[in-house]
Structures are given as C-alpha cells and as structure tokens.
Amino acid sequence: MRAIPGSPPVEWRIEPGLVDYQPAVAFMEERITAISEGRATELVWLVEHPPLYTAGTSANASDLVEPSRFPVFQAGRGGQYTYHGPGQRVAYVMLDLERRRKDVRAFVAALERWIIGALAAFNVHGETREDRVGVWVRRPDKGDGIEDKIAAIGIRVRRWVTFHGISLNVEPDLDHFTGIVPCGIRGHGVTSLVDLGLPVAMEDADAALKASFVEVFGPCATSQD
C-alpha cells in the first residue's frame, strides 16, 4: 500500500492535549478536500479525545447501553459504536488511494498490518478475524478461547482519499467501554497494552505506530507544527 515513486512523504502529526471530536472531523473534511485537489500532502493525525461515543453508519441503537453517560456523535464512518477517550491513541489516516491502490479492502488490510506490526514491538501478538472487525489478542489468562479487542478500525473514503482511521488502546479507562456494545460485537471483551501488563507510555506507542507505518505505507515526515 505504498505510494507511487516520487510522492512526498506522509505528514505525521501528533496533537498535544485532548481534541474535541467535532472540530477534528471538520479538520479532516477540509484536509481531504485539499489532498484530493493536490493542495496538501497526505496526513496521519494522532490525537486523544475526551470521553465520548461515536456511531458509525451501521450502528444499532440497542448497542448504546448508556446514552447519557458521554456525548454521542454521528461519525459518518463505517462501522458501529466505538468509544474514544484519554489513554487511547486515535490515528486519523488521510491517504490518497489514487497514489497507492484504489482498493478499499486492501487499504483496510494494510491498516490491520500496521496495527499488528506496532503491537509486535511490545511482543503482543495481534490477530484479525473474518467475522469480527479490528485487532484482537488471545487471553489465556482469562480462559481458553477468550479474545479481547485492542484496536478498532473505522474508515470512510471520498474521491479515493481516506479519512477516520484506527484507535489503539494504550491505557484508557476500560470501564468506559461498558456504555456501548463495542462495534456491535457481543461476547468478547476489550483490553489495552497496560491491561496486558505492559507499562507502555503514549510516546512509546506512537514510536511503534510510526515505525510500523513506514513498513506498510512508506516514508513519513514529522510535522513541525
């Protein structure tokens, strides 16, 4: 899923503090328009949000267990309900598939490889399942066959430019996920790097994500903003 030769490196931007959801979506809308018109480079934008729930285009109202717990936003991306909050790294991925490969399934598979590669830096074996979206880890400490979700994927594509992206649980409050049925999947739990017993700081997770991104998607350049 690398860009064609001669393409500029992807901008890699880490936003400090907590970013409100609606301004983040507005920024993405503006940026993908600029990318599609050739006025801006591709961008991976790493943020943390205050606690909130988002509903994808396939969200089932019955999966919003506690509608008054946190703000709920219609996300416009694919998928169902997700939680975002402090301690979770959200990576908004704005790539031009015209420069890469005009294949949405291949793009999602590349996102999965990216996450799995980043987890491997901490000796965590991430896996995908054909009947369940996201990236999963086996939990033999909880019993045979138990798997927890550690990362979610939800994207949208407009004029072959991608937006929205992935979320990786580094050290969020896992109790916050109980207000929804995450991604509409029942019978499975949610975990994080810290919940797995790994003292991973957000900076460590970002470094692993960047290294794996380069392997899967190609060069990136850290923003100086």
Image: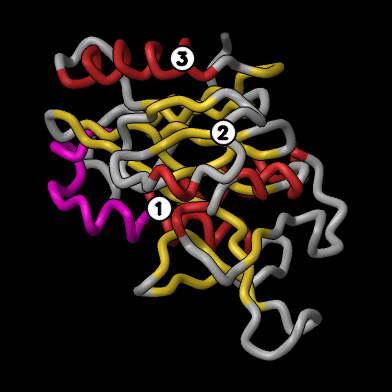
x and y percentages locating residue 29 in the rendered image: 30, 16
Which one is nearer the viewer's eye here, 115 or 174? 174
x and y percentages locating residue 67 in the rendered image: 56, 33
- Residue type at the position of mark 3: Gln
Estimate how packed mark 1 is, as few (under 14), some (14 to 19) or many (20 or more) residues with alpha carbons within 10 Å.
Answer: many
x and y percentages locating residue 12 in the rendered image: 50, 28
Q: Residue at x 43, y 49 (%)?
A: 153
Q: State which mark lies toward you, 2 or 1.
A: 2
- Disc 1 is placed on an element classified as helix
Q: Residue at x 45, y 48 (%)?
A: 62
- Disc 2 is placed on an element classified as loop
Instruction: Return the disc, 3 or 1, that comes first in the chain's sequence.
Output: 3
Mark carried by residue 111: 1
x and y percentages locating residue 172 in the rendered image: 74, 42
The magenta stretch spans residue 100: yes
Q: State which mark lies toward you, 3 or 2.
A: 2
Instruction: Return the disc, 2 or 1, that comes first in the chain's sequence.
Output: 2
- Disc 3 is placed on an element classified as helix
For the record, the magenta segment spans: 94-111
Classify residue 143 as left or right of residue 71: right
Q: Quadrant of the C terminus?
A: top right
Mark carried by residue 22: 3
Is residue 83 in view from this perspective?
Answer: yes
- Residue type at the position of mark 2: Pro
Spatial distance from mark 3 to mark 1, Cα to Cα?
A: 23 Å
Which one is nearer the viewer's eye here, 173 or 61? 61
Instruction: Return the disc, 3 or 2, that comes first in the chain's sequence.
Output: 3
